[in-house]
Structure formats: structure tokens, C-alpha cells
Image (tube, rainbow, N blue to C red):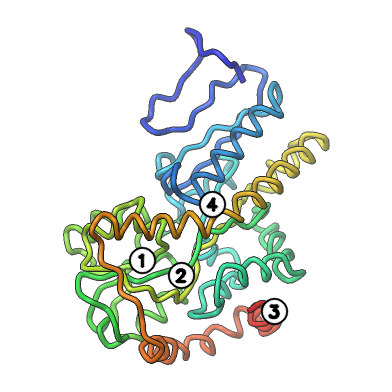
Amino acid sequence: MKKILTAGIVMLATAGTAYAACDSGERVVRFSHVTANSGHPKGEAAALLAERVNAEMDGRLCMEVFPNSQLYNDNKVLEALVLGDVELAAPSLSKFEQFTLSFRVFDLPFMFSDVAAVDRFQASETGQAMLDSMQDSGLQGLAFWHNGMKQMSANKPLVSPTDAEGLTFRIQTSDVIEAYINQIGGNPQKMAFSEVYGALQTGVVDAQENTWSNIYTKKFFEVQDGVTETNHGIIDYLVVTSTEFVDSLDAADRDQLMGIIKDVSTERNAMAEGINQDNRAKILAEGGAIRELSDDDRAAWVGAMAPVWDQFADGIGQDIIDAAVASN
Ligand code: LMR
């Protein structure tokens, strides 16, 4: 990577792109994602990854990060990876349904008590085996990245699950999420992340569920009545590439890249919870309402969504569910 930008170097003019100017001999690694690039667990991790690759693999690999859905939304990016139009992505674990049913374990409501439990599960033998579970479809998982626990927001106060009756919820492309929103009497609508703010603002949808970091950095709280601290699920990510890209790297470059991804994952995963709490505080500081649940209210949400576990157990596999439960 050239340290000084000179005339003749192709620069990406898209606002906010964490671009690198790549030398002609360098292999370009495009990393496409959908969230903000700063003040966000995924954005910050992707930026550090690019910084380290560009410093330590200078002359061989050159990483360019495209945040904020500038290149692809999460449903298109997996196709783009397999076609070789992009080399790296980190979609949420809810977006892999068309490739594997096992990832549905991450969407089961109230499965994980906190992000530390998610971390233990992902580090377990069962979790690590999931990285290789989509090789037949040409996808290779490289690491799990944390975002955090999901909260619910709506254009009216949500305290009891019955408050959700009749509300249209934007959801990720996950049949498990669709099922638990149906379970509380809501109308789930699958939609790309880049469209959520507009859909909330115009009333196309009434409600959504997401992490503090996504709710703050995408300003969802500004077009909602408030956010209810449900902690009913998680948003985490799979850093993913194509098997073809992995195979195309020479062994030394592959090992070095994997080593950097491992270091960055450990370092940034340890910061994810703090980043979410900062974003929670910013929502309050900017006038957003946050509602906490009493133990009884929380029990009502848990009970209302519980039937979904049985509905998806066969597809996920009881061994995977048991390992996830044990991580709590
Ligand atoms: C969403 O679609 O709500 C999230 O998966 C976005 C993200 O990448 O955190």
C-alpha cells in the first residue's frame, strides 16, 4: 500500500469508505459490510483488520473496507463472495439460513444469557465446527465477531409481549425471528438493514429489534417511541470468505492473514460489550427513552416466545442446542 497518495492512484470517492490505495502488484481484498464504520463493534473490527493487513502484508495484500451497505446488503453479499466480486464480509449469523440450518441456534429467543455465553459457545468444539459447515456451498467461516444483545423498539411503549400485538416488525431474513414475532402477535417483515430507518420513519414498519450499537449509529431510536431492554437474542457475525479465495492464497499469506484475523477478533470481541453500553448511554443522552423490564415482565416475554424452540430443534440439531445451553 502506498503511504502517500499521488496522482494516478485510483481512489474510491464514496463518502465514508475506509479506502486504501493499492499498488498494482498487491492482491486487493474487498471487505463489504452494512454497519457504521466507527463507534460500532463490526465497523471498528473491520477497520483494525484492514489497518493491520495493510501494514503487515504491505506489497502482497491490500484490504479495502466498504461499510454502510455501500457495496452490498447482507443478503446479496454471500452471493457476491461466491462469485468472487468481493473477498470478505461479516453478515450477522441470522443471514446464513439458505446455506445451513445449524446457525438458527443463534436466533432462538432467550438462548444466551449474555455475550460471554455466546463467546463460550463459539469457542467450543461445536461452535468452531460451524465455521466449516458451509464449505459445500463455497463459503468458509474464518471467525465469529460479537455485536451484542438485541433490544426491541416500537412506535409505542412495549412492556408486555401483548403490547406487540398487531405491530409490523422489521426483521432480518430469519425464519426463527419470523416465528417468534408471530408468537407475540406481531407481523414480521424481512427487510435489508439499509432500509430500516426509512421504513420506521415512514411508518412502513412500526417496530424492530437490534443491538444498542445498531439502534444508535443508525438513529432508529429517533423514529421510535422508545427501546425496551429485552436482551431477548443476539446479533453476532461470521467473518466469511469463499473457499476459492482461501485456496488461491499461498500458504504463507494464508497463515499470516488467518493469524491477523484471530488477533483482531480476540481484541475487538473483548470491546464489543463496552461499545454497546456506550451507545446505550448515547441514546439516553440524546433524549431516547429506554424501558427496563421487571422480572415478571421478562418472564412473560420468555414464556410467549418459548414454543419456537421446539419448532426449530430438528433442523438445528439437539446436540448443537445442548452445547449452546451448556455455555450459559
Ligand atoms: C441487521 O440486519 O439488523 C443486522 O444484521 C445488521 C448488522 O450487520 O448488524
Q: In the rendered structure, which disc, 4 or 2, sits on the residue that comes first in sequence?
A: 4
**Which label is found at residue 31?**
none
Gap in angstroms between the C-alphas marked 2 and 1: 8 Å
Mark 4 C-beta to ligand 1 under 8 Å: no
Residue drawn at 59 percent across, 69 percent down: 103
Where, by quadrant of the figure, is residue 283 drawn? Answer: bottom left
Gap in angstroms between the C-alphas marked 1 and 4: 17 Å
**Which label is found at residue 190?**
1
Kindly identify which residue carries mark 3: 323
Q: In the rendered structure, which disc, 2 or 1, sits on the residue that comes first in sequence?
A: 2
Kindly identify which residue carries mark 2: 174
Gap in angstroms between the C-alphas marked 3 and 1: 29 Å
Crowd tier of the residue under label 2, counting other residues whose Cα lies within 10 Å: few below 14, some 14–19, many 20 or above: some
Q: In the rendered structure, which disc, 3 or 2, sits on the residue that comes first in sequence?
A: 2
Give the quarter of the figure containing the N terminus. top right
In the image, what residue type sits under mark 3?
Ala
Say which of 78 and 204 sits in front.
Answer: 204
Mark 1 C-beta to ligand 1 under 8 Å: no
Crowd tier of the residue under label 3, counting other residues whose Cα lies within 10 Å: few below 14, some 14–19, many 20 or above: some
Above or below, 15 against 312 in this view is above
Residue drawn at 47 percent across, 76 percent down: 176
Q: In the rendered structure, which disc, 3 or 1, sits on the residue that comes first in sequence?
A: 1
